[in-house]
Amino acid sequence: MGGVRGRDFLTMRERSLEFIVPGDLSSATGGYIYDRRIVEGLRGSGWRVAVHELDASFPFPTPAALDHARDVFGRLQDGALTVVDGLAFGAMPEVVSRHAGRVRIVALVHHPLAKENGLSSALAHQLAQSERAALRSARHVVVTSEATADALISYDVPRGSISVVMPGTDDAPLARGSADGVPNLLCVATLIPRKGHDLLIDSLHALARVPWRLTCAGSLVRSPETAARVQSKVREAGLAERVYFAGELNGGELGRLYESADLFVLPTRYEGYGMAVAEALAFGLPVVSTRTGGIPELVGERAGLLVPPDDGVSFGKALARVLTDNALLAALREGARERRSRLPRWPQSCAKMSQVLEGVMSA
C-alpha cells in the first residue's frame, strides 16, 4: 500500500497551533499587528490556531503574570506546536524550559529584549541573559529581519535554527500629499524612548522657518513619561500649532494619514524590522529615518535618506535637505514608488510562516 510522507501528510491532517502573546492581540503596535496578521493568515490557510493572551506586564512580569503563564503552559497538550511571542518568551526562561521536553516551542523574536532603549546596563544585561537562557528551549526561532537573525547569533542560536519571516504589507493607494503646499510629515510610532520623538522635535525646532506640519500617530499611554516629555518639548519649542498627536489609530484612520502625507519620518534608535516604514513605502511615501534593523533593506538607495541611529544632528540635516529641496523630495518620492512593488505581501509572509511551522512539525 502506498504511503504519504512529509508535507503531503501534513497538508492532509488538521494543523493545530498554540499562539502565546503577552497582552491584547488587538493592540496597534507593530509586533502585535504582525502577530495578528500571521494568526489570521494561518487560520485562512487551514490552521487551527488557539491564541492565549498573557498578562501585559511582560517583559517585566509580575509574580501573578508568571503564575498565569505557568498555568497556560501546563494546560498545553504533549507535543503541541506552540509559538511564543518574544516579548514574553525571553522573560520567562524557567517556564519555557520546564515544558521544552514535551511541547514543540517556536520563539517569535521581533528584536532582542535588551535592545530596548532607556534600559540601564545592568537591566539590559539581565534581559540578555534571560533571553539567551530561554532560547535554549526553542525548537526553532522565527525573526522578522535578517538583522535580528544576525543579532541572535551572539545569543548562541545556530543560524540553521532561525527562519526569517518578514512582515507583509497590504495593497495601498499612492499618497496624494498635502492639498495646500505645506508638507505633511507623518511619524507612526508608539511614544517610547526608543522611537526618538525627542530627536524629531529638536530637528523640527531648528526648521521652524520652513513650512511643514507633523502628525504623530501612536499610543500616548505605553510610556506616559515619554509622552509627557515630548509634548512638553513641543510646547517649549513653540510648535504646538504645527505638531498634532493623534494617539493610537485603527487601520482606516491611519490609512487616511498615510494618504495625505508627503514624507514619513522616524528617528528610531533601534528597530527589528520597521513595519511603519514598510507601510509608508506601500503608499509610495519617501522616508527619512535611521540605519537600523531592516530599514536599510526596505528603503534602499533611492526611496529615502537614512542616518546613524541616535544622531540628532545628522537626522536634522537630512530632514532639512528634503524639506528645502523640492527636486530631492520628488526624486525620493519616485524611488519610494519603485520600492513599493518589491515589498512582501501578507499572504506571502503567512505562507512562509506556515512552511516554517510545517517543518517544525515534521522534524
Image (cartoon, rainbow, N blue to C red):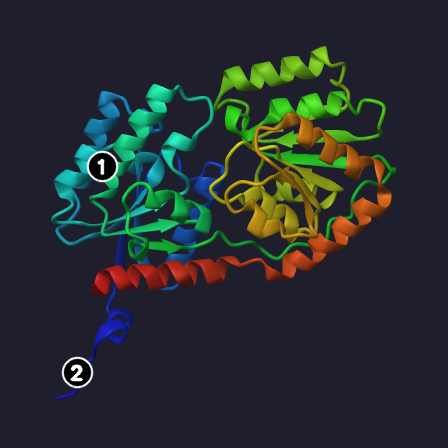
Residue placed furthest toward the bottom: 1
Say whether residue 183 is visible: no
Residue at 80%, 36% (x, y): give it. Answer: 323
What's the residue at 46%, 36% (across, down)? Answer: 27
Disc 2 residue type (three-letter)? Gly
Quadrant position of residue 219: top right
- Graded by Cα atoms within 10 Å as few (under 14), some (14 to 19) or many (20 or more), the crowding at tag 1 reads many
Residue drawn at 47 percent across, 42 percent down? 272
Q: Position of residue 307 (x, y in %)?
A: 63, 37
Q: Secondary structure at mark 1?
A: helix
Disc 1 designates what residue? Answer: 133
Res 249 → quadrant: top right
Residue to which mark 2 is pinned: 3
Q: Taking 176 as reference, is 38 left or right?
A: left
Q: Quadrant of the N terminus?
A: bottom left
The residue under the point 77% across, 29% down is: 213
Q: Is residue 175 left or right of 145 when viewed as pictured?
A: right
- Mark positioned earlier in the residue sequence (1 or 2): 2
Q: Nearer the viewer, residue 350 or 234?
A: 234
Find residue 336 and report its horizontal and vertical position in percent.
70, 53
User: Helix, strand, or loop for circle 2?
Assistant: loop
Q: Quadrant of the C terminus?
A: bottom left
Is residue 200 something one can see in this rendering?
A: yes
